[in-house]
Structures are given as C-alpha cells and as structure tokens.
Amino acid sequence: MNGNLFFIKEYISVNEHLYLYHWQMADGTLMTRWDNSPHHREIETFPHHKHNPNLEKSYETTFEKLHEVIKTNFIRKN
C-alpha cells in the first residue's frame, strides 16, 4: 500500500464503543484520522469527527466500515 500506515484502537463494552482509526503516509503525514474522543463539542456530529488534516464532522464508524474503504480504494486488484 505504498508504505501507508494504519493504526487501529478500539474499546468495545456493553455500554460504549470508543475508537480511533489513524491513516498516515510513510513519512508521517496524516491522511485521515476518525475518532470519537469527546473534545470537539463544536462539531455537529459530536463526538464523532475526522481529521484530514482539517477537522470535519463524521458519523460513527467501525473497523468493518474502515476495512471496506481500504478494500475499495487501496488494495490492488490482480
């Protein structure tokens, strides 16, 4: 995948789903990070948001949804 890196951090319990999905280039440049850390109350979709590198609204995502994005856009088809 051209040296791109993905970091995945999830905590799932009966009462909550906390996540951080981080995608960066090999040189460390942020491509996109989706998370639901409760620190951007000004975002309409609080606590869900994404950085790419700007801050944008986002909807709750899961690893399965992220996996589909990766498969669709980044995995070479033979």
Image (spheres, rainbow, N blue to C red):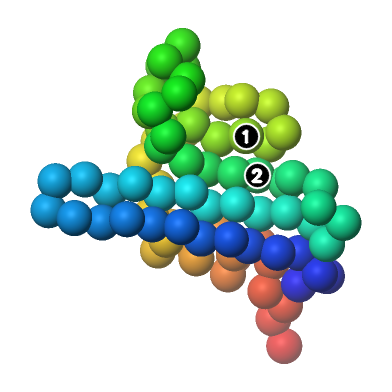
Q: Quadrant of the C terminus?
A: bottom right
Q: Residue at x 41, y 49 (%)?
A: 19
Q: Residue at x 47, y 20 (%)?
A: 40
Circle number at residue 32 = 2
**In the displayed structure, would residue 41 be above or below residue 58?**
above
Circle number at residue 19 = none
Residue found farthest to the left? 14
Q: Position of residue 36 (x, y in %)?
A: 41, 37
Give the left or right position of residue 3, taking residue 61 as reference: right
Residue found farthest to the top? 42
Q: Residue at x 69, y 81 (%)?
A: 77
Q: Position of residue 10 (x, y in %)?
A: 38, 57
Question: Label 1: few (<14), some or many (≥20) within 10 Å?
Answer: some
Q: Are marks 1 and 2 in contact (CB under 8 Å)?
A: yes
The residue tagged 1 is 51
Residue found farthest to the right? 27
Res. 71 visible in picture: yes
Q: At label 1, which amino acid type do we have?
A: His
Q: Position of residue 65 (x, y in %)?
A: 43, 57
Of helix, strand and loop, which one carries label 2? strand
Q: In front: 9, or 59?
A: 9
Q: At label 2, which amino acid type do we have?
A: Thr
Residue found farthest to the bottom? 78
Q: Tell me the quarter of the picture where residue 32 sits.
A: top right
**In the displayed structure, would residue 31 be above or below residue 9?**
above
